[in-house]
Image (cartoon, rainbow, N blue to C red):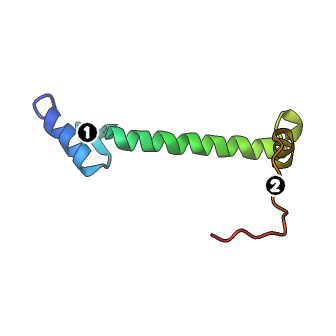
Amino acid sequence: MRENALALLRNVQKKEEPTIILHRSKPQAVLLSLKEYLKLQELLEDYADALEAIEMEKNPEEGGQSLEEVAKELGIRLPSKNVSINH
């Protein structure tokens, strides 16, 4: 691998997909481009945030606030629920 490290890195960056590193024909590690790694990190953070939001909705007494409460606190007027927003 040492001899081909630069070629391996160029290949990972070019393909923008994971490269599986084998040792004795068994998968041992995965090599990702920095771009792909950062994209996966962002997805994981978004997923964790979504799970946390779901839990807060289930247990509002544990510190979560509804959208209406936040809007009132910030002095923001929300559109009525009967109004549809067209894009």
Q: Amino acid at mark 1?
A: Leu
Give how far apart the Cα atoms at labels 2 and 1 are. 55 Å
The picture places residue 55, in percent across and down from the top left corner, at: 77, 42
* Circle 2 residues within 10 Å: few <14, some 14–19, many ≥20: few
Query: Going from the N terminus, do you reach mark 2 or mark 1 first?
Result: 1
The picture places residue 8, in percent across and down from the top left corner, at: 18, 39
From this viewpoint, is residue 31 visible?
A: no
Location of residue 33 by image quarter = top left
Location of residue 3 by image quarter = top left
Q: Residue at x 37, y 44 (%)?
A: 36
Q: Residue at x 85, y 39 (%)?
A: 73
Q: Which mark is residue 34?
A: none
Q: Residue at x 73, y 44 (%)?
A: 53
Q: Which residue is mark 2?
A: 78
Residue at the left extreme of this rendering: 3
Secondary structure under tag 1 reads: strand
Front-lying residue, 4 or 44: 44
The picture places residue 67, in percent across and down from the top left corner, at: 81, 48
Left or right: residue 63 compared with residue 85: right
Secondary structure under tag 2 reads: loop
Front-lying residue, 54 or 1: 54
Q: Which residue is mark 1?
A: 22
Residues under numbered marks 2 and 1 in contact, where contact means CB atoms less than 8 Å apart:
no
Q: Residue at x 71, y 40 (%)?
A: 52
Front-lying residue, 73 or 21: 73
The picture places residue 39, in percent across and down from the top left corner, at: 44, 44
Q: Is residue 83 above or below residue 1?
A: below
Q: Is residue 53 above or below residue 86?
A: above
Q: Amino acid at mark 2?
A: Leu
Which quadrant holds the N terminus? Answer: top left
